[in-house]
Image: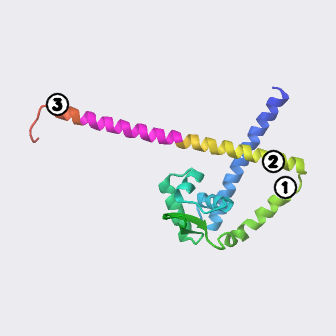
């Protein structure tokens, strides 16, 4: 194995450890906050957006189905973390925004990990930080693309199953119509 192949293997292994540790951390943080892990990430994503979003946009951003995104927003609304607002440009639409003070209520839980992350980043020089930023941008885009791919595959599979069910139902109806009657028994 060449030095590059070994380095790529090590990067892949560390990437798997990284994602596992942050997934588990997200679960622990969600448990501490009394939320679902997806709810925690939705709050994070809403905080990063410059404007409130529709539930449909939240679905697209999180990769959830529209129904799941609606239930997520319902949970966060009930918890007082987001609020629904009429869209001033189109009163038929509803926008979802972080509730005033929503994140400050979560601040205590994030203080220790946030400080630890800041301390870690302080150990890198500006060039290393620029490389880390580039990595996060690229791997984030890759993750979104892979999530979109899985969503499209799942949708195609659902449509395929629906088509098969419809064809089976038609076949059953055709078969029943062509079968001689056996009477009431």
Point out the tag, 2 or 1, that comes first from the N-terminus.
1
Q: CA distance from mark 2 to mark 1?
A: 10 Å
Residues at circles 2 and 1 in contact by the CB criterion of under 8 Å:
yes
SS type, badge 2: helix
Image height of 111 relative to 163, above or below: below
> What colour-coding does the image apply?
rainbow
- Residue 26 x/y as whole percent: 67, 57
Point out the tag, 3 or 1, that comes first from the N-terminus.
1
In the image, is 7 to the left or to the right of 178? right
Q: Residue furthest top?
A: 1
Image height of 46 relative to 157, above or below: below
> Residue drawn 67% across and 52% down?
23
Image height of 122 relative to 183, above or below: below
User: Where is the N terminus found, in terms of image quarters?
Assistant: top right
**Residue 178 — which label?**
3
Residues at circles 3 and 1 in contact by the CB criterion of under 8 Å:
no
In the image, is 84 to the left or to the right of 163? right
Q: CA distance from mark 3 to mark 2?
A: 68 Å
Q: CA distance from mark 3 to mark 1?
A: 74 Å
For the residue carrying disc 1, how many other residues have a C-alpha within 10 Å: few (<14), some (14-19), or many (20+)? some
**Residue 121 — which label?**
1
- Residue 93 x/y as whole percent: 50, 62
Point out the tag, 3 or 2, that comes first from the N-terminus.
2
Q: In this orientation, which residue lies closer to the viewer: 25 or 83?
A: 83
Write the start and end of the magenta stretch as one range. 152-172
Q: Main secondary structure of the magenta part?
A: helix
Q: In this orientation, which residue lies closer to the viewer: 92 or 149?
A: 92
Residue 161 belongs to the span the image colors magenta:
yes
Residue at the disc numbered 2: 132
Q: Residue furthest left?
A: 183
For the residue carrying disc 3, how many other residues have a C-alpha within 10 Å: few (<14), some (14-19), or many (20+)? few
> Residue drawn 74% across and 40% down?
13
């Amino acid at each position: 194995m060449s030095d590059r192949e070994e380095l790529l293997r090590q990067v892949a292994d560390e990437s798997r450890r990284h994602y596992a540790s942050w997934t588990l951390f997200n679960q622990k943080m969600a448990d501490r906050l009394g939320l679902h892990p997806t709810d925690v990430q939705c709050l994070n994503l809403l905080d990063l957006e410059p404007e409130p979003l529709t539930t449909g946009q939240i679905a697209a951003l999180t990769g959830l189905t529209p129904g799941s995104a609606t239930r997520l927003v319902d949970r966060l609304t009930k918890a007082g973390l987001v609020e629904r607002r009429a869209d001033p440009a189109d009163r038929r639409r509803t926008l979802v925004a972080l509730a005033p003070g929503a994140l400050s209520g979560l601040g205590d839980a994030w203080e220790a990990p946030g400080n630890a992350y800041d301390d870690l980043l302080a150990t890198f020089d500006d060039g290393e930080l620029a490389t880390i930023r580039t990595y996060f941008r690229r791997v984030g885009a890759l993750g979104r693309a892979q999530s979109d791919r899985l969503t499209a595959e799942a949708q195609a599979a659902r449509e395929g199953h629906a088509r098969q069910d419809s064809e089976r139902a038609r076949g059953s109806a055709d078969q029943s119509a062509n079968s001689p009657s056996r009477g009431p028994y």
